[in-house]
Image (cartoon, grey):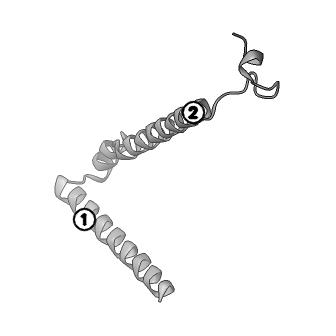
Amino acid sequence: MTLAEQGACAAQIGKPSPSQIERTRTGAQRSVLVLASSIVVAFLAAANAPSPLYARYDTARHASPLIRADRYAVHDASEARVEAAWRSVGRRERT
């Protein structure tokens, strides 16, 4: 039995059904999500990779591990202050 015999009009022949469209859209959305997630993971991994220059800087400055730890502690404390300031600015805008 042909499509014409089943009562399909010429405009519907060759058109995908709504379920086929939904499956294609869902597959495309999943592909975009996987791609975006892999990019984010790659950036986070690169940001946490230690620089090979750190060892060179430490030997040039004769820095001990204690000084290096102190340097990171100061950096973390200042970063926490900046983050707290941004959060307080965001709260003021909402009220």
Q: Nearer the viewer, residue 18 or 95?
A: 18
Q: Is residue 41 above or below residue 75?
A: above
Q: Check residue 35 in the rendering and tell me which mark sits there, or answer none.
A: none
Q: Nearer the viewer, residue 92 or 55?
A: 92
- The residue positioned 21% from the left and 58% from the top of the image is 69
Query: Mark 2 sits on what residue?
Result: 19
Question: What amino acid type is highlighted by mark number 2?
Answer: Ser
- The residue positioned 33% from the left and 43% from the top of the image is 50
Query: Do tag 2 and tag 1 residues touch (Cβ < 8 Å)?
Result: no
Residue 46: horizontal and vertical position, in percent? 41, 41
Considering every residue shown, the one lying at the far top of the view is: 1
Query: Mark 2: which secondary structure?
Result: helix
Residue 65: horizontal and vertical position, in percent? 18, 53
Query: Mark 1 sits on what residue?
Result: 73
Q: Is residue 25 above or below residue 64?
A: above
Q: Which quarter shows the N terminus?
A: top right
Q: Nearer the viewer, residue 91 or 7?
A: 7
Residue 29: horizontal and vertical position, in percent? 54, 39
Query: Mark 1: which secondary structure?
Result: helix
- The residue positioned 71% from the left and 19% from the top of the image is 6
- Which of marks 1 and 2 precedes in the sequence? 2
Considering every residue shown, the one lying at the far left of the view is: 66
For residue 61, side relative to residue 22 (left or right): left
- The residue positioned 72% from the left and 27% from the top of the image is 15
Question: What amino acid type is highlighted by mark number 1?
Answer: Ala
